[in-house]
Image: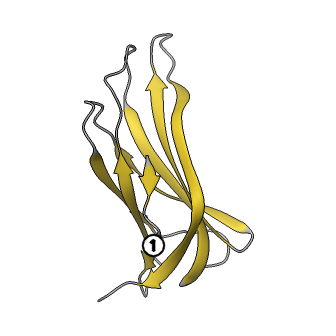
Amino acid sequence: MSAAPTGTVSTDGTVTLSGTYRCSPLSGPGPVFVSSTVRAGEVRHGIGGTAATCDGVEHTWVNRDKPMHGAPVAPGPAEVEATLVHLDTRSGLPMPRIIVTDRHEIELRPAMS
């Protein structure tokens, strides 16, 4: 699991993050997602989620969202966190189980129009 060293911010404030992941077939039922957040300054924003395919092959992921609360995200340095999460449904109630997380500094660049 990795997040790319750069992301983008469009003029309307939409943040796009991307990276790659690989996971093996799971032993328990339930979906797997790639979730991501970005922290610019003191505020952390959730940036979308992507359904993952756990087949042992490397896949790319792209999450984009427009943060609605807190200070708007602007181009510049930020921290990204990307997490591969399994929603285990064996008990009937989906219970999140973190498979792996990648967290590091990135550069947010203006999105090309």
Q: Give the residue displayed 38% in from the left and 14% down from the top.
A: 27
Residue 62, position in %: x, y? 34, 59
Asked which colour scheme the image uses, the reply is: secondary structure
Q: Give the residue displayed 28% in from the left and 36% down from the top.
A: 53
Q: Is residue 39 above or below residue 46?
A: below
Residue 20, position in %: x, y? 35, 52
Q: Secondary structure at mark 1?
A: strand
Residue 72, position in %: x, y? 60, 79
Q: Is residue 55 above or below residue 101?
A: above
Q: Nearer the viewer, residue 15 or 83?
A: 83
Residue 35, position in %: x, y? 47, 48
Q: Nearer the viewer, residue 36 or 11?
A: 36
Q: Nearer the viewer, residue 1 or 63?
A: 1
Q: Is residue 33 above or below residue 37?
A: above
Q: Give the residue displayed 36% in from the left and 20% down from the top.
A: 26
Residue at image mark 1: 6
How many marks can you see?
1
- The quadrant the C terminus occupies is bottom left
Q: How packed is label 1: few (under 14 Cα within 10 Å), some, or many (20 or more)?
A: some
Report the amino acid beneath label 1: Thr
Residue with the most extreme top position: 91
Instruction: Say whether residue 16 is left or right of residue 103.
Output: left
The part of the image, by quadrant, that contains residue 71 is: bottom right
The part of the image, by quadrant, that contains residue 67 is: bottom right
Instruction: Say whether residue 29 is left or right of residue 53.
Output: right
Instruction: Say whether residue 52 is left or right of residue 69.
Output: left
